[in-house]
Image (tube, grey):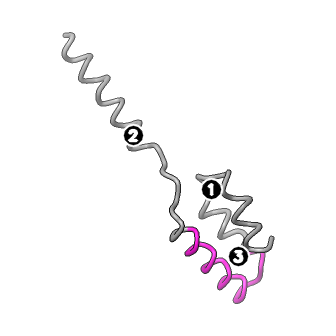
């Protein structure tokens, strides 16, 4: 019985590790900026801004910095 509870706790720990979202690397952020600029060029700046917001929704502390870089 104790073994079963121990195994359940171990599984919960593994799920938390999987669900944790890692911060994006510089290459990803550069890619988001390039895509947003291309979208702004073709469809208007609001869609470029929206692309950045959607791409970085899991990292709100990076959102404002990247929007400033974009020129929003």
Instruction: Point out the tag, 3 or 2, that comes first from the N-terminus.
Output: 2
* Number of the label disc, if any, that sits on residue 48: 3
Would you say 34 lies left or right of 5 here? right
**Dot 3 lies on which element?**
helix
Quarter where residue 40 is shown: bottom right
Residue at the farthest front position: 26
Instruction: Point out the tag, 1 or 2, that comes first from the N-terminus.
Output: 2
Residue wearing tag 1: 57
Q: Front-most of 53 and 66?
A: 66
Image quarter (top left, top right, bottom left or bottom right) of the N terminus: top left
Q: Front-most of 11 and 66?
A: 66
Q: What stretch is highlighted in magenta?
A: 29-47
Residue in the image at 38% along x and 44% along y: 18
Residue 32 coordinates in the image, percent (x, y): 59, 72
Residue 64 magenta-highlighted? no
Instruction: Point out the tag, 1 or 3, that comes first from the N-terminus.
Output: 3
Q: Crowding at label 1, few (<14), some or many (≥20) Cα neighbours within 10 Å? A: few
Quarter where residue 16 is shown: top left
Placement of 10 over or under 59, stated as above or below? above
* Number of the label disc, if any, that sits on residue 17: 2
Would you say 11 lies left or right of 26 here? left
């Amino acid at each position: 019985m104790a073994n079963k509870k121990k195994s359940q706790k171990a599984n919960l720990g593994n799920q938390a590790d999987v669900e944790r979202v890692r911060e994006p690397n510089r290459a990803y952020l550069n890619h988001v900026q390039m895509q947003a600029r291309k979208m702004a060029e073709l469809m208007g700046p609001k869609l470029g801004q929206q692309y950045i917001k959607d791409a970085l929704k899991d990292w709100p502390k990076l959102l404002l910095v990247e929007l400033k870089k974009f020129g929003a």
